[in-house]
Amino acid sequence: MSSAPPVFISAADVERLLPRASLLLPGLEAALSNFSAGPAGGVEQPLRAVLRVRPYRGFLGVMPAYSAADDALSTKLVTFYEPRGDSAAPSHQATVLLFDPRCGALRAVLDGAVITAKRTAAVSAIATKLLMPRPAAVLCILGAGVQARSHYEAFTELFDFTEVRLWNRTEQRALQLASSVGGAVRVCGTVRDAVCGADVIVTVTMATAPILFGEWVKPGAHINGKLLTETAPGLLMENMRPLVAGDAVQSVGASRPDWRELDDALMKSSVLVVDSREAALAESGDVILSGAEIFAELGELLKGTKPAQPEKTTVFKSLGMAVEDTVAAKFVYDAWSAGN
Ligand SMILES: NC(=O)C1=CN([C@@H]2O[C@H](COP(=O)(O)OP(=O)(O)OC[C@H]3O[C@@H](n4cnc5c(N)ncnc54)[C@H](O)[C@@H]3O)[C@@H](O)[C@H]2O)C=CC1
Ligand SMILES: O=C([O-])C1=[NH+]CCC1
């Protein structure tokens, strides 16, 4: 085995070698299925360790994983800090260390920010493909940061939405994102306006209290998107509320046990799918504090051991898994090694 020093792959090189999140779809689908297969799937992934940097309202997460199918071993180090007006630093910063699993030698140090942005959007797209109503016309993104952009890019590449709506706590940031993406985006002044009649809602904020409420979902909530998009608000029957949230909610933020993006009503009235049961029950305020029952892991839907139920209102609670970084880092390193 060679003892060559590790290579460093910068953010610009990761972006060049991994230009689209969709390139990760096959590898991520396999890894999510393998993860949910238990020991037979060959994914080793402990619950991540998250250390609190209390004086600065920050966190350092350590995320190791080994995937036998990919024969890849990595750990990501990710810091995330609650918004502070005086800081110009990105809220999330990350580095991925990729090892040779045969001998433990460090092969590469990769910028982890682009990897995190793209693999997270790719996983949300995998969930959306399974859970969204058919047809799905209106995409709504709540949040206007790094993940909002990567989700916009992946979702507009992979799906045929006819309308994209964007809301952010500070409207100026939403306007900036909307004007920079190159496609038509409607910036909405309130979450209610943004989600009314949407088919797919992506929540990608640093919120610590709910921003999306179940009262905006029609009672019963087992609604399909076709009905919602074809029914003008004024024509809704009297026993229905005039505001309706989309059927497939991708909740990407609120990754602390006391943080929320979704309220209890929405959590409890939806079919709840998570990336990892273990992580959801340890880390997700939306899951823990609502007491909502987890229906399935995304990997179980992919394997077909649990049905996806796109006709129902669904919430995919994404916390982010280390094996997703392993797959993405190996993809980038292989492309780099091939001289691309
Ligand atoms: N599930 C996963 O795999 C991953 C999840 N995340 C999570 O996704 C979320 C977004 O991450 P980034 O886009 O990188 O962050 P960012 O800092 O780039 O963007 C955060 C957005 O949230 C908004 N925001 C801040 N505080 C808010 C509040 N109290 N209420 C509503 N909006 C608020 C900001 O205006 C901004 O638009 C975070 O919660 C992050 O922890 C990030 C990486 C991976
Ligand atoms: O998976 C990930 O990298 C993260 N999830 C929440 C914060 C960072």
Image (cartoon, rainbow, N blue to C red):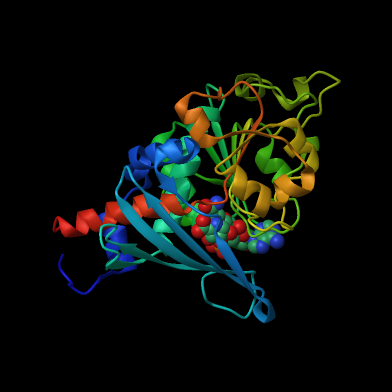
> In the rendered image, which quarter contains the C terminus?
bottom left
The reply to whether residue 33 is visible in this rendering is yes
- For this rendering, which residue is in front, 259 or 61? 61
Q: Position of residue 45 (x, y in %)?
A: 48, 52
Q: Is residue 259 left or right of residue 6?
A: right
Based on the displayed image, in which of its 4 quarters is residue 33 positioned?
Answer: top left
The reply to whether residue 176 is visible in this rendering is no
Q: Position of residue 135 (x, y in %)?
A: 52, 22
- For this rendering, which residue is in front, 32 or 208? 32
The tally of labels here is 0
- For this rendering, which residue is in front, 198 or 19? 19
Q: Position of residue 303 (x, y in %)?
A: 45, 27
Q: Is residue 288 left or right of residue 181?
A: right
Q: Position of residue 121 (x, y in %)?
A: 46, 47
Looking at the image, which residue is at 69% across and 35% down?
Answer: 196
> In the rendered image, which quarter contains the N terminus?
bottom left
Based on the displayed image, in which of its 4 quarters is residue 272 positioned?
Answer: top right
Q: Is residue 335 left or right of residue 224?
A: left
Quick check: 78 above or below 127?
Answer: below
Looking at the image, which residue is at 65% across and 79% down?
Answer: 56
Quick check: 154 above or below 230?
Answer: below
Looking at the image, which residue is at 64% across and 30% down?
Answer: 247
